[in-house]
Image (tube, rainbow, N blue to C red):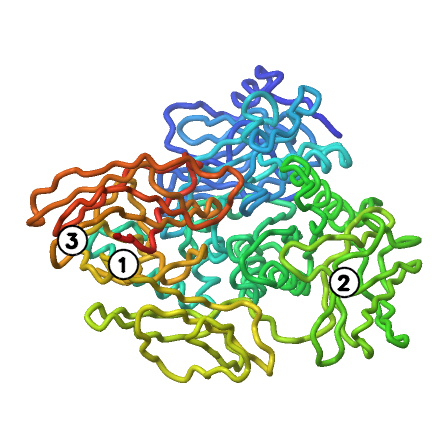
Amino acid sequence: MKVSLSFAKFPFLLGLWMWGVGILPTQAAVKLPAVFSDHMVLQQQANCDFWGWATPGERIRVLTSWDGAQIDVHADSKGEWRLQLETPEAGGPYQIQVIDADTLTLSDVYIGEVWIVAGERYVAESLGEVKASTSRSAQDRLIRVYRPEKELSELARSDQKGRWWPAAGPRMQDMSAVAYAFAQSIREELDVPVGILQIDYDQTPIYAWISMEGLQGNPAFAPEVEAYQAESREYRKNPSLMDPVRKEHPSTVFNGLISPLIPFGVRGAIWYHGESFVRDPMRYRKSLITLVRDWRIHWYQNFPFYWVQLPPTHLDMPFLAAGIRESQVEALNLPGTGMVVALDMGADFSPAQKSQTMGTRLASLALKRTYGKSVQDQGGPVLKSIQRQGQTLMLDFDHVGSELMLAGEELRSFEVASKEGPYFKARARAEGTAVRVWHPEVEEPYHVRYAFSNFPDASLFSVDGFPAAPFRTDDRPLFFAIPKATITFDPLKKQYKVALRYPAESPHIMRYTLDGNQPDQQSDEYEAPFSVNSPMDLQIRVEEREVLSEAILHLETMEHLGFGAVMRRGSRPHPSFAGGGKHSLTDGLLGKPIFDQPQWVGYGDEELEFVWDLNRRRQLDEVVVRFLLDRRHGMVPPKQITLYSSKNGTKFKQIATLDCPALEADVIRQVVSFKVPLEGERMLFLKLNTTGYAEPLPEDVDPVIMIDEVIME
């Protein structure tokens, strides 16, 4: 690595030079965006955009110490100015002087390789959070990270709050563990400074990361864009409503975190995402392609874009994660893209191991494809051909080395099927660079799939130890969604009107039963909204091309003393989980642990209040409140529940308080019921208050309290 003689080390030289060119600093109006600051890294051997603001018409002079260059530019009528800095080979430390009436000095500037590291979950997990090793030997001041503050925006911003810092000292703990592993590998191999633009925001849909221009050009995003724009219009009319600028809305992450960085010079981008969009795998394919194109258009640069395939994850519907992985493979049709497989990162991988492995695999991919280095390719075995031999299928693979490697004593996660029949768990045997699969009940095998599930057991590896990506050879329909139900409750008739739709473009049939049995191909076909009496046990599944979905929408109701009670007043629901109005918490509808079911109503306030008119005096022995715990989406029960009774609906008496018990630490998602005993209290009105949250949440998570029913017995 070239390290030059800098003005930072010999400031008197800079002073002589400035005196020689007639620069006499006075008072400043010039301003730079936050991404240009001390300790930054600029992309080497590039024409790097450099910009800022000053008084309109003012001359700006920029001096670079690596080559002694002097560049003049004038601020335009808006006070904006922009120029390009021609950077040398990697080196430093350098200084950049920005001068109009006064002088801004950027110190400790290095030239090297700059990468965007963006996304959710693992990108967002810091070295401190995963308890990765950050010993003194692991620290490296020539790895630099810029991390903006998480400020979302409705409109594209030109600046943000953020700063660069070296990967050393206490601040190192805040750096993304994946980003550090990636940067460390790049630095060790290339021996150059490495700069990371770390843009992380957990639990965000992919359309939040795409510009509005990119979204509006794609009809797949029309529902979200139209809903967001409508909510924004209502908010401007009535500012007392919830601010629509939230992480689940289109373009808000792009506008606040990405836009201010454009077009800072970068070599490429790495990306981890998918978990927050896992319920819409087919649309994720279009979304990922749109995102890559959108960023490249804004940067005016077809830079390399590499991502991590979704690792094993537990979900409540089959094939969701498999569908995301398939979509991530399809997006590789874009030139200049690449993917590392994480199928082996299951329960036996610690968070630190996952981060380290993801980062180093991404770095190896970049080193080979972007820098042309002779390192191991991260591609595992890839299916090359399939041949039927009697009652077996012989699968031949590329990218295996001399032979296939197995995890354990046998190959697992293979399934085999006839041309039209169901899949069976296959027996499999490795034979050099091929795998033979069969099942005794499949006499004429035709299709095969490997690791095609949410949480597969990876067993197939190349000789270098890289896992094979999941695959399937059929084009059978996969059901990545369950039918969506709109339910209207009639408290007088104790009846529900049910309207169904299936969020897919392909031809399909919805079949249902009302007796609690699973629908089959002889069950009633849904044609129009219908009415059902309470209690009900409704089950719905989808049929496409004579194949029935494995996932079933199950709607179950119950009756209780408060069934159908009118909510006289209550806290305002969260716009994304608004529920069904004044009967939404006493309509008898019980939710499953799936937050987007219509039974759940969400509230974004820390203190909630509800009052029900019970229509006549009732004696209650207990009240049971059902909450949804979903830690991945910031959904937790309250810390405390307090109940009040009243005879007239105006004066209330406190009758019970419950400090909610501790939640199970290892549970990610479940329905939690809290029972408040009342000992036969008589009342005409019931008031329920909640305060606080059952457990603390990360600062960047907006907590939501989800309730499906308040059961009065």
Within the image, what quadrant is residue 440 found in? bottom right
Q: Could you tell me how far apart the alpha carbons at marks 2 and 3 are, in whole angstroms?
A: 59 Å
Q: Amino acid at mark 1?
A: His
Question: Which residue: 60% across, 58% down?
Answer: 321
> Which residue is labeled 2 in the image?
414
> Which residue is labeled 1 in the image?
560
> Which residue is labeled 3 in the image?
618
Left of 626 or right of it: where is 270? right
- x, y (%) of residue 20? 55, 22
- SS state under label 3: strand
- x, y (%) of residue 569? 17, 52
Q: Could you tell me how far apart the alpha carbons at marks 3 and 1 are, in whole angstroms?
A: 12 Å
- x, y (%) of residue 365? 74, 48
Marks 2 & 3, CB-CB < 8 Å contact: no
* Residue found at the far front of this picture: 680
Residue 257 seen by the camera: yes
Q: Crowding at label 3, few (<14), some or many (≥20) Cα neighbours within 10 Å?
A: some
- SS state under label 2: strand
Left of 637 or right of it: where is 21? right
Question: Which residue: 55% across, 44% down?
Answer: 121
Is tag 2's residue or tag 3's residue first in the polypeptide sequence? Answer: 2
Q: Amino acid at mark 3?
A: Arg
Question: Which residue: 24% across, 47% down?
Answer: 621
